[in-house]
C-alpha cells in the first residue's frame, strides 16, 4: 500500500506539501516535493521531501524504502533542472544531536559556491 498523502497534522512540511503554508516550489512529482529553504545557507539551498510523513532516515522501513529512494532520484533530476553541473552537496539530519529541527525527512541540496572537503 502506498504511503503517499499520509500526513501529520502538526508537521510544518506536511502543511507545505498540502499547500497550507506557502513555499517556493522547485520540483514536484507523485512522490516528492521540493522547495527553497526559507533561510538559505548557500546560494542554492533546496529542501526535498517525500509526500508522506516520515520523521527521518531513522524511520525507513521495507514498506517506505522505495518511496524514499524516489526522493534521491528526484534530487538528481532537480540538479539537472537547476543546472548544478559544477557540483552539489546533499545533507540530511536525523535526530537532535545531528541538528534536525523539522521532524519530516528532508534532504538539503546545497550548491552555488566552492565548498570545503570537510563535512562539519
Ligand atoms: P534541519 O535543521 O535539517 O531540520 O532543517 C530544517 C530546515 O528547514 C532549515 O534549513 C530551515 O531553514 C528550513 N525551514 C523551516 N521552515 C521552513 C519553511 N516554512 N519554508 C522553507 N524552509 C523552512
Ligand atoms: Zn510531515
Image (cartoon, rainbow, N blue to C red):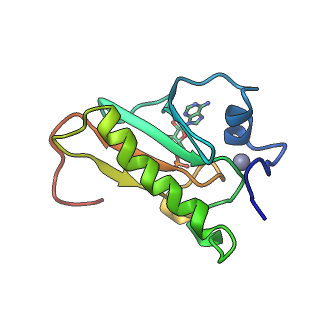
Residue 94 sits in which quadrant?
A: bottom right
Closest to the observer, 34 or 114:
34
Quarter of the figure that contains the C terminus? bottom left
Q: Is residue 33 left or right of residue 13?
A: left
Residue at 57 percent across and 40 percent down: it is 29
Where residue 42 appears, as percent x and y from the top left, is 31, 34
Where residue 76 appears, as percent x and y from the top left, is 36, 49
Where residue 23 appears, as percent x and y from the top left, is 59, 25
**Does residue 34 sit above or below 119 in this rendering?**
above
Where residue 108 appears, as percent x and y from the top left, is 43, 46
**Does residue 103 sit above or below 45 in this rendering?**
below
Looking at the rendered structure, the number of numbered marks drawn on it comes to 0
Residue at 65 percent across and 52 percent down: it is 104
**Does residue 4 sit above or below 97 in this rendering?**
above
Residue at 67 percent across and 59 percent down: it is 55
Closest to the observer, 77 or 84:
77
Closest to the observer, 116 or 2:
2
The answer to whether one can see residue 95 in this image is no
Closest to the observer, 35 or 62:
62
The residue positioned farthest toward the right in the image shown: 9
The answer to whether one can see residue 45 in this image is yes
The residue positioned farthest toward the bottom in the image shown: 62
Q: Is residue 87 left or right of residue 101?
A: left
Quarter of the figure that contains the N terminus? bottom right
Residue at 67 percent across and 40 percent down: it is 13
Q: Is residue 57 left or right of residue 41?
A: right
Amino acid at each position: 500500500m502506498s504511503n503517499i498523502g499520509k500526513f501529520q497534522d502538526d508537521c510544518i512540511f506536511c502543511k507545505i506539501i498540502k499547500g497550507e503554508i506557502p513555499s517556493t516550489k522547485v520540483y514536484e512529482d507523485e512522490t516528492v516535493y521540493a522547495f527553497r529553504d526559507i533561510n538559505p545557507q548557500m546560494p542554492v539551498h533546496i529542501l526535498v521531501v517525500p509526500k508522506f510523513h516520515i520523521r527521518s532516515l531513522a524511520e525507513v522501513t521495507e514498506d517506505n524504502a522505495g518511496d524514499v529512494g524516489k526522493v534521491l532520484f528526484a534530487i538528481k533530476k532537480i540538479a539537472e533542472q537547476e543546472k548544478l553541473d559544477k557540483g552539489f552537496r546533499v545533507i540530511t539530519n536525523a535526530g537532535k544531536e545531528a541538528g534536525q529541527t523539522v521532524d519530516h525527512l528532508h534532504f538539503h541540496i546545497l550548491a552555488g559556491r566552492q565548498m570545503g572537503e570537510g563535512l562539519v
